[in-house]
Image (cartoon, grey):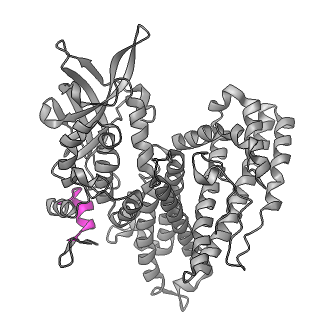
Amino acid sequence: MHIDARIDSECLIVILVDSAKIDREAKIPPETLNGLKELGLFGIMIPEEYGGLGLSNTVYARLAEITSLDGSIAVTLAAHQAIGLKGILIAGNEAQKQKYLPKLASGEHIAAFCLTEPGSGSDAASIQTRATLSEDGKHYLISGSKFWISNGEMADIMTVFARTEVVIDGVKKDKISTFIVERAFGGVTSGKPEDKLGIRGSNTCEVSFDNVPVPVENVIGEIGGGFKVAMNILNSGRFSMGSSSAGMIKKLIEMTAEYATTRKQFNKNLGEFGMIQEKFALMALNVFVMESMAYLTAGMMDRPGLPDCSLEAAMVKVFSSEGGWICVSEALQILGGLGYTKNYPYERYVRDCRILPIFEGTNEILRMYIALTGMQYAGKLRRARTRLEVTLIITEVGSVLFFFFQTIVDEQLILKRVADVLIHLYAMTAVLSRTSRSISIGLRNHDHEVSNMTIMAMFTAFCHSFLFSSTDWYAHQKGLTEPVQYCWLQSSSFSPRLSLPDVSSNRIECRQLACFANTQSPVARKKIDFV
């Protein structure tokens, strides 16, 4: 693998990356890291006034697609800028940005995001690390341990979350606050790097803080506002997983296709068999959808006004991480024994890919977030349904909310199914948008995109129907048969009306589809009519 970038009209920097060596030695060589720094890849989204490249979310997604060819490098870069320094970027004051961003942009300093603890993973609000104000009121003394910290051993600057005592309406309460911690402050120690299954070259370890003195000027945002800062950081960084997964799978498809066109069985190339072709089709479809979702979301995030795209980003993360796992499994099935041995690079993709549904928020937690957040908009969208030819699942979701009311948070199987429908509706929205544009501008091979879109439309309809058929079964167990059957009858009218788009006039009419995900999203506020 190599990474290259043109620095000026005459100079081309090329970085040679030995992924097998990185995986074997569980370390990215210093010369590779230095090359990444020369390319400016540690400051992709840092504004130019602070020494960064100042690139857009869309370009960041494209670069993430390239760097994903080595999972360890991709994670190292993402841990640095997607979450490590993001708190300073989105919530830091001007003095903090001037002080820290230039060296972070150049790669002279490496950043880490310190939230997870031995006793708190998905439940971020239960962290125990504590920050106590010193007697002179000039410092916070931070003590505690953080677990599974990417870049933990090499980080110079850390975004650390700790409990602080705040007074609200005269009552003392514990609230989470965010701090910029320099290793040079003293009292910061790193444990032995974890020996991981995949992304082995990325540095992951425990980081401990023993009465680390942090100046009060290093508080990000307000004291007690750290939980919101943490969620904003995580929410803003997930969208690039779509392009990262797509980049990795495209390379795997390329290598697998080369094998399938040369390997002969029963006097035929492996690629000539129908079931093998089906596997390639499934991988290609997943990559197409991942790309479509990632770049649609990135484009929305680049719009003026910094729109809230956290829900869309979560959908991209869930679909892409699970789609990537499906693809590596299908590729290994094609490769047979070659895919199962360490003499070839294929098995490394399996190990690197397995972390995707786990980090930056587990897919189970994100499904809860998608469903519960989406439900907040059900009532608002109900009022708009007279202006929509079809309003998807709003009646059904409203019925579920009515019968479960306050206990809906505990109905995880219901929420999972609702989230799956929303994820596939957003995926369908992204695919339709991309395909419509390809037809309109006359892109070569746009007929392949139409085929992908058609398959995705049928799968979305199936997903919607499955949700309510399984809910109907669940209703028998809960004694809610009659009300939920009514809900099912309401929803079943959707499937017959889902006709595939007419592309004969070089225009896709998609009035039947409304994105339920987020009313802040342009596609959710009005009827979708892509040109």
Q: Which residue is drawn at 61% across and 45% down?
A: 519
In the picture, residue 453 is in which quadrant? bottom right
| Residue 141, x across and y down, in percent | 21, 21
Residue lying at 73% horizontally and 47% vertically, measured from the top left? 393
Judge whether residue 145 can be spotted in this image. yes
Residue at x 54% of width, y 55% of height = 319
Residues rendered magenta in the picture: 15-29
19 w.r.t. 81: above or below:
below
**Residue 509 vs residue 492: left or right?**
left
Foreground of the two, 282 or 510? 510
Q: Where is residue 521 in the image (x, y as percent from the top left)?
A: 57, 50
Q: Residue at x 26, y 59 (%)?
A: 41
Quadrant of the rendered image containing residue 161 = top left
Q: How many marks?
A: 0
Residue 359, relative to residue 509: is it above or below? Answer: above
* Foreground of the two, 77 or 98: 98
